[in-house]
Amino acid sequence: MNTVVYTVPKIHCANCVHTVETELSELPGVESVKASNADQKVTVSFDAPASDDQIRTALAEINYPAEA
């Protein structure tokens, strides 16, 4: 299992946290998602078929792009 922490500056409220967690949880292979508006971080644990690129793409598609 891979665990990656992303910095997502657009997370600023509970609704943002809910949106990010809900959307990423639906990706095949994603085991857990924990977003925080306090530090603007998203921690994702995943296995194949999910990938770092796929998670970054999903974040960008919902208008919460991760920093490089």
Image (tube, rainbow, N blue to C red):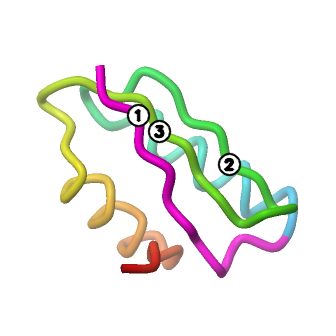
Name the residue at 86% across, 57% down.
14
Instruction: Identify the residue under disc 2.
Output: 35
55 to 27, vertically: above or below:
below
Query: As shown in the figure, which amino acid type bears the numbered disc 1?
Result: Thr
| Disc 3 crowd, CA 10 A, few/some/many (<14, 14-19, 20+) | many
Mark 3 to mark 2: distance in Å?
Answer: 9 Å
The magenta stretch spans which residues? 1-12
Instruction: Identify the residue under disc 3.
Output: 44
Which image quarter holds the C terminus? bottom left
Name the residue at 72% across, 49% down.
18
In this orientation, which residue lies closer to the viewer: 3 or 35? 3
Query: As shown in the figure, which amino acid type bears the numbered disc 3?
Result: Val
Asked if the magenta segment contains residue 8, the reply would be yes
24 to 10, vertically: above or below:
above
- Given contact means CB atoms under 8 Å apart, are the residues at marks 1 and 2 in contact? no
| Disc 2 crowd, CA 10 A, few/some/many (<14, 14-19, 20+) | many
61 to 46, vertically: above or below:
below
- Quarter of the figure with residue 4: top left
**SS state under label 1:** strand
